[in-house]
């Protein structure tokens, strides 16, 4: 399937905690590429709440949006070379690559 990054898109973003009846924020973009860039680069914390994008009759989840952003077909310049997935509760951060520890 070929995705049309030039198509108009609507982005829906939850305003709070996940739940069956949560308030939403809405934003319309002239291109799906811009909506994707905004969702990934400008609202990284919102990704954990499950935003979605509507392009024509197709609905794309937050995971779909990230896949479209990371695709080699994505037409815009990316701000971040690699987008990190939000940390899950209870998981510890990756070990430091510096190899040593600093003391105050």
Image (tube, rainbow, N blue to C red):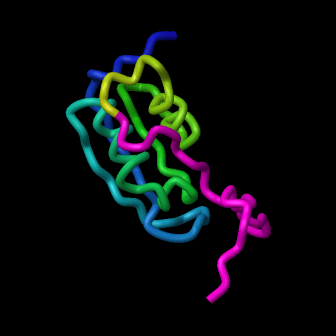
Q: Is residue 104 left or right of residue 100?
A: left
Which residue shows up at 32% across the image and 22% down it? 75
Which quadrant holds residue 94? bottom right
Residue 60 located left or right of residue 56: right
Q: Position of residue 70 (x, y in %)?
A: 50, 30
Say left or right for 3 vs 49. Answer: left
- Residue 7 position by quadrant: top left
Residue 85 versus residue 13: which sits nearer the camera?
85
Most distant residue in the top direction: 1
- Is 71 in front, or is 61? 71
The region drawn magenta spans: 78-104
Residue depicted at x 61% and y 56%: 86
- Identify the residue at image location x=66%, y=60%: 98
What residue sits 24% from the left and 39% below the top?
A: 29
The quarter of the image holding the C terminus is bottom right
User: x, y (%) of residue 82?
Assistant: 52, 40
Was residue 101 drawn as part of the magenta stretch in this picture? yes
Q: From this viewpoint, which residue is outermost toward the bottom?
A: 104
Q: Quadrant of residue 32?
A: top left
- Determine whether 58 is above or below 84 in the image: above
Q: Main secondary structure of the magenta part?
A: loop
x and y percentages locating residue 103 in the rendered image: 67, 84
Residue 97 in view: yes
Reply above or below: 101 against 7: below
The one nearer the camera, 96 or 30, is: 96
Label tally: 0
- For residue 36, above or below residue 21: above
Q: Relative to the observer, which residue lies in front, 73 or 92?
A: 92
From this viewpoint, is residue 88 visible? no
Is 103 above or below relative to 85?
Answer: below
Magenta stretch: residue 22 in it? no
């Amino acid at each position: 399937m070929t995705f049309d990054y030039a198509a108009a898109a609507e982005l829906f973003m939850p305003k709070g905690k996940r739940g069956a009846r949560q308030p939403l924020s809405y934003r319309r973009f002239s291109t799906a590429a811009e909506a994707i860039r905004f969702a990934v680069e400008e609202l990284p914390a919102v990704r954990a709440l499950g935003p979605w994008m509507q392009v024509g009759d197709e609905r794309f989840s937050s995971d779909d949006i990230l896949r479209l952003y990371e695709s080699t077909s994505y037409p815009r310049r990316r701000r971040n070379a690699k987008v990190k997935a939000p940390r899950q509760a209870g998981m510890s951060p990756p070990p430091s690559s510096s190899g040593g520890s600093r003391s105050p």
